[in-house]
Image: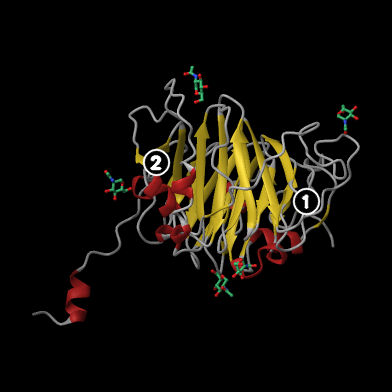
Amino acid sequence: MLPLNLLLAALPLAAAQSLSDLILDTAPSSPRPYIIPHYANAHAVTIGQQLYRFPVTGPSSDYAFTLMSTNAPASSSLGVLPHIHQKHYENFFAFKGRFQLWAQKGDGAQEARLLTQGDYGSVPRNTTHTFQIVDPDTEMIGVISPGGFEDLFYTLGTNFSSATNTPYVPAASNSSSSPPAEVIASLQKFDVYAQLDFEPTRDLVNGSSSTESSWHAIDSTVTPLGEPAQPYFIANNYGPKYLNSRHGAYQIVQPLVTNAQSQDTNYTLSTIIMSRLHAGSADSWKGDGACAFEVLDGSVMIQIGKYPVARLESGDVAFVPKGTEYRYWSERSYAKVLYVSSGEGGLDRRLIEGGKSWAYPTFPTSWKKTEL
Ligand SMILES: *[C@@H]1O[C@H](CO)[C@@H](O)[C@H](O)[C@H]1NC(C)=O
Ligand SMILES: *[C@@H]1O[C@H](CO)[C@@H](O)[C@H](O)[C@H]1NC(C)=O
Ligand SMILES: *[C@@H]1O[C@H](CO)[C@@H](O)[C@H](O)[C@H]1NC(C)=O
Ligand SMILES: *[C@@H]1O[C@H](CO)[C@@H](O)[C@H](O)[C@H]1NC(C)=O
Ligand SMILES: *[C@@H]1O[C@H](CO)[C@@H](O)[C@H](O)[C@H]1NC(C)=O
């Protein structure tokens, strides 16, 4: 038997990594850099008419977070019966189409919103919640921390893959997507606690159950993030904004969850808008936690570890393991991504700390590095 040092010497030098190694069809079983294109199979399962995909899983992120998407047609019934998670913080983001989301914490008021593209709903632990899809081509993005929650869907769902990568199956099925009450009631081992007494209100006016807080109202001021452990909703571009110009281009960060809200679930979630930047000017970043980017608008170039530069288009997801260097930029005039990061040192937090409060989801008309 060869001594270990000879064995290692016999290995070829690391071959140049290629894009085809980086771009995968399903999330890997342990953390490494990867990209999952929009509508890739990504461990897809169907539950009734809903099609779930899992670009970031527990195993692929070392259980930092799960990033999933749900595509479905409009439905006349709830997408799932009302329930609570005791250990998982769940985030709902409307990629396209519309869905209604209900949330209630303990004895607090029941809140409901109609979410359309770019709108966000925050469902901390122990919040009763449910949803209903109401547009023909709807896609919800779900971010759940910690990771691993997809096991529930693997158990409830039917494996799916398609040669055309259609968003969801165009079947005229009339079956409810929600598992029946007796099944929901048996899911506590997956951190699902049925709340079958919850009666979702249908009294929404202008997309909201609340007369106190505004929702897509033209005269509304900045919608603040919620108190820790309380559910809240932020309409697209109505939340707090920060402009950062320290890295060669403008970046506008809109936090959806900061470490103040996530507490010990230990993650941050934001959107980031970016102006054009030349490849050579993009700074290098490294996180103390895993992170992922999903393109919402435009396209984003990303270079992760030793892999070649890849272009991410709308709905594509890039995953960066903790401690891996990466660079990202937009070659075009405008791009927007959803960003999730494990831990307290996320890119979003660092851009906010290096930026200034800003009122618009657009950047200034000429380039000027901010002097702070
Ligand atoms: C479904 O897919 C998973 C991998 O995502 C696999 O482990 C499992 O065996 C599949 N189940 C069936 C019934 O094919
Ligand atoms: C959630 O509720 C369970 C059961 O009441 C409780 O044990 C747990 O501490 C709660 N979690 C949080 C974060 O409040
Ligand atoms: C769909 O299901 C509902 C409730 O089960 C039923 O009332 C309705 O008639 C069904 N529609 C069709 C087209 O089968
Ligand atoms: C609903 O929206 C319309 C149009 O913006 C506005 O005039 C009306 O006051 C809103 N209703 C409520 C209850 O906020
Ligand atoms: C938070 O996440 C970071 C990055 O994943 C990790 O290093 C740290 O141990 C976590 N802290 C807690 C309290 O879980």
Q: Amino acid at mark 1?
A: Ala
In this view, the residue in front, 114 or 78, is: 78
In this view, the residue in front, 3 or 204, is: 204
* Residue 250 makes an appearance in the image: no
Residue named by callout 1: 109
Expressed as whole percent of the image width and height from the top left, the position of residue 336 reads 65, 42
Q: Amino acid at mark 2?
A: Ala
The residue depicted at 68 percent of the width and 65 percent of the height is 259
Which mark is first along the chain, 1 or 2? Answer: 2
State whether residue 269 is above or below residue 75.
below
| Local crowd size for mark 1, using a 10 Å CA cut-off: few (<14), some (14–19), many (≥20) | few
Residue at the farthest left position:
1
Q: How many numbered discs, if any?
A: 2
The quarter of the picture where residue 244 lies is bottom right
Secondary structure, mark 2, is: loop
Left or right, 282 with respect to 50, comes to right
Question: Quick check: is the Cβ at mark 1 less than 8 Å away from ligand 4?
Answer: no
Q: Quadrant of the N terminus?
A: bottom left
State whether residue 275 is above or below residue 287.
above
Left or right, 203 with respect to 11, comes to right
Secondary structure, mark 1, is: loop
Expressed as whole percent of the image width and height from the top left, the position of residue 25 reads 36, 43
Residue named by callout 2: 44
Expressed as whole percent of the image width and height from the top left, the position of residue 139 reads 56, 35
Left or right, 168 with respect to 349, comes to left
